[in-house]
Amino acid sequence: MWCNKILVAYDGSAASKRALNMALGIIRPSEHIELVFVHVTRMAGVGTMTAGVDTVIANDAQDILEELELIANNIPNSVEIKLLVGTSPADLIVRCAREEGCDLIIMGSRGRGGVKGYLGSVSYAVTKESPIAVLIAKEDE
């Protein structure tokens, strides 16, 4: 098989949901393909001025991780779920794929804040930096 381990970057956006569905389609015929679901988040900072923002971001990340866990529980393949925290989402995704020994990264063309019709800055950076294949899922029109 050309692919043994797939990293799926997921943020809850329509494009990332499509990326997740693409990954599930790829693994369907083979239970030996492993999955790594990642959600990337940034914390606003430390201190009282950003405590509320950090709480909102943490709650959002927890909701997404719970959503990914429900999905993982319904597929027979081995799935690892990771929360990546840092300042450069693209670097975090590429580093995680490398450390996990992934053969493929699947992600949406843009996240929740992206401009429709354009490749997002994170997906663009991942395609440039990744030493492995990257499959970009576009939103349904």
Image (cartoon, helix red, strand yellow):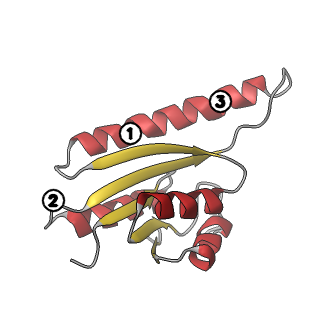
Q: Residues within 10 Å of mark 2 (few under 14, many from 20)?
A: few
- Quadrant location, the C terminus: bottom left
Estimate the x, y position of residue 85 in percent, counting from the top left: 63, 44
In this view of the protein, can residue 130 be seen by the observer?
yes
Q: Which residue is mark 1?
A: 67
Residue 60: name its quadrant. Answer: top right
Q: Is residue 134 shown left or right of residue 119? A: left
Estimate the x, y position of residue 103 in percent, counting from the top left: 38, 71
Q: Is residue 80 shown left or right of residue 63? A: left
Q: Which residue is mark 3?
A: 56
Q: Looking at numbered disc 3 in the image, what kind of residue is underneath it?
A: Val
Q: Looking at numbered disc 2 in the image, what kind of residue is underneath it?
A: Glu
Separation of disc 2 and disc 1 at Cα?
A: 21 Å
Height in image: 69 above or below 98? above
Estimate the x, y position of residue 38 in percent, counting from the top left: 47, 50
Q: Residues within 10 Å of mark 3 (few under 14, many from 20)?
A: few
Q: Which residue is mark 2?
A: 31
Q: Residues within 10 Å of mark 1 (few under 14, many from 20)?
A: few
Label 3 secondary element: helix
The residue at the point 76 percent across, 37 percent down is 44
Task: First in sequence, mark 2 or 1: give its number.
Answer: 2
